[in-house]
Image: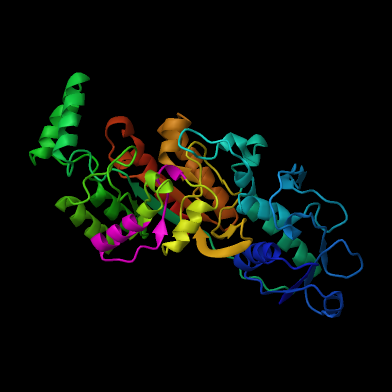
Amino acid sequence: MLLVYSEPVTSRLRYIARLLLGDLYGIDLSFTDNPDEFTAWQGPGICYSERPGLGGLRIHPASLLAETNLYDSPVGIDHAGGIPVLFPAAGGDLPFDVFAASFYMVTRYEEYLNSKKDKYGRFIPSESITLTNGFVKQPVVNLWAGMLVRQLQKRYPGLELRPRSYKFVSTIDIDHAYAYRNRTLFRTLGGIGRSVIRAEFSQLAERFGVLAGVSRDPFDCYDFIRSFHREQGITPHYFILFADYGGNDNNVSLTGSSFRQLLARLSDEAVVGIHPSLSSNRHPERLEREIAGLSAATGREITSSRQHFLKFSFPKTFRHLVTNGITDDYSMGYASVIGFRAGMASPFHFFDLFRNEVTPLLIHPVAAMDVTFRDYLHLPPAESLDQMKQLADTVRSVNGEFITLWHNESLSDTGRWKGWRKVFEETVAYSAGLMR
């Protein structure tokens, strides 16, 4: 048992100390605001206080964890051992407040305060402290936790650790289950008309071949996905867009027999979660309907989610997920940037800053997405593969959870995604191999 002393002991401190020391390293924790109890303690301890002479590993606190409101104040940045750190402070056994720095990152404190959004209403990555200071590709919170634990081990060599193990999770979004099948007559005629106007005659021939039943729909690569994951000894995690057609929510017809059969098959062989529609952010009542519809179609309880377009807002989106029984969310990543949005490469519970309370919702950070490499960074497949492997190595080095995001259409190996299936295969094989 490790005893943490602070005056006061706040919900913020309990949350972040348990994340860094309990969740990541398996250390049992207890807290006290009684200085006499702390000085009498014979085991390992952390003194999170400005008061000198109480013993234990001393961390000089910033004010962040003692506050109950949000303040748009400058955050100091320094470096320690070549690693960027926030809230630098003198007088402690670490040169910064590791608890405040980590809390600031994983709660996405800065996103509550920044009103600038992109055209989809998303937080703009270039506004983040990690982008402006060049450390978005470093899981700094994991690194900071390691720094803290090493200091504890120096002071308390007998401290028992049960660190987490590296894990790889292959996730696939299904925004468009099929390119041509299971679409309404109106949408099919519209697609034919666009192909004629644009003189896309090869696409037109492909569409007619699929509709006539003589060709396979190019987005129907589910047999490949299933067999390849089985070869690697892992189970994929699908996120299904199950929303009414409109705007950027334009999957196939929800009532189509082929789509229903596909959902039943996927839920039998993999993990299936909801891909909440873009419109559900504006109309939260649709989220409940989408989850219920997917659950009915699969015959499974739906407890995981990833937001369409990675669009979410704090704390509204995550409150709605909790209300609707979602226990695990996989949206914490950027569409246009690879790396670690929350500075974290391991799962962590969502902390509601407005209510100052931890929630049961577990956030699983996403490090890399197919569309990011191709459409935002404009990188060729070979260079994208190199960066995927570097990210996997980085996550493995901190015993994190490496999560990649692909789409069934990007695995079609056709059209604009020609050559990208190989990137997927080598990424999955390499990342899964690191678990062995």
Going by the picture, which residue comes out furthest to the right?
A: 53
Who is closer to the viewer here, 227 or 52?
52
Q: Tell me if 340 is positioned left or right of 325 in this view.
A: right
User: Where, by quadrant of the figure, is residue 298 drawn?
Assistant: bottom left
- Specify the quadrant that holds the N terminus: bottom right
The stretch drawn in magenta includes residue 298: yes
Q: Where does the image place residue 102, in percent across and percent down from the top left? A: 67, 54
Colouring method of the image: rainbow
Left/right placement of residue 109 relative to residue 366 reads right
Q: How many marks?
A: 0
Does residue 402 appear in this view? no
Q: Is residue 93 above or below residue 210?
A: below
Give the percent coordinates (x, y) of residue 233.
Answer: 36, 60
Q: Nearer the viewer, residue 181 or 386?
A: 181
Between 137 and 333, the one lying in front of the other is: 333
| Residue 30 visible within the image | yes
Q: Seen in the image, is 160 located left or right of residue 93?
A: left
Q: Is residue 388 magenta?
A: no
Residue 293 place in picture, x, y as percent: 28, 58
Of residues 263 and 379, the one drawn nearer to the viewer in this rendering: 263
Magenta region: which residues? 288-311
Q: In the image, is residue 185 above or below residue 172?
A: above
Residue 389 position in % (x across, y down)? 49, 44
Picture residue at 68% right of the left edge, 50% below the top: 70
Residue ID at (32%, 56%) = 289
